[in-house]
Image (tube, rainbow, N blue to C red):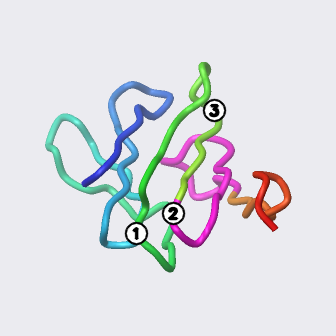
Amino acid sequence: VQTVAFAPDGERVLSGGRDDAARLWTLDSLSPERVVLSSRMPVVCVTADAERRRFLVASDSGFTLLTGDPASPQVSRTPLPRAAYGRS
């Protein structure tokens, strides 16, 4: 695990690491609940907005915006085009 951010409920964290995945963990048991996003490269950063309703997952392959509660199967995953973060 290289990076973590708290989920909206404060009882879970979203992690990222060299296994190319963003995982949701339950703090009570410290066990992984589910893989929220599979990346093609190691996840180097996860961060949340102030309201913890959006998460940005960064890997060497790009950025993905997660919208909604990551514990929900309906969480939206939006890959951001390279132009959105200043790369061509």
Say which residue appears at 61% left-offset and 28% top-offset.
49
- Magenta stretch: give its range: 59-76
Disc tally is: 3
Q: Earlier in the sequence, mark 2 or mark 1?
A: 1
At 31% from the left edge and 68% from the top edge, which residue is drawn? 18
- Between marks 1 and 3 in the image, the one whose residue lies nearer the viewer: 1
For badge 2, the amino acid type reads Ser
Label 1 element class:
loop
User: Does 74 appear in magenta?
Assistant: yes
Is 64 situated left or right of 1 in this image? right
**What residue sits right under mark 2 in the picture?**
59
Label 2 residue SS: strand
Rendered location of residue 86, percent (x, y): 79, 53
Q: Give the number of the mark in front: 3 or 2.
A: 2
Q: Which residue is mark 1?
A: 42
Give the answer, above or below, for where 19 lies relative to 65.
below
> Residue 88's image quarter?
bottom right
Name the quadrant containing residue 73. bottom right
Check disc 3 and report the residue beneath it: 53
Left or right, residue 51 beside residue 7: right
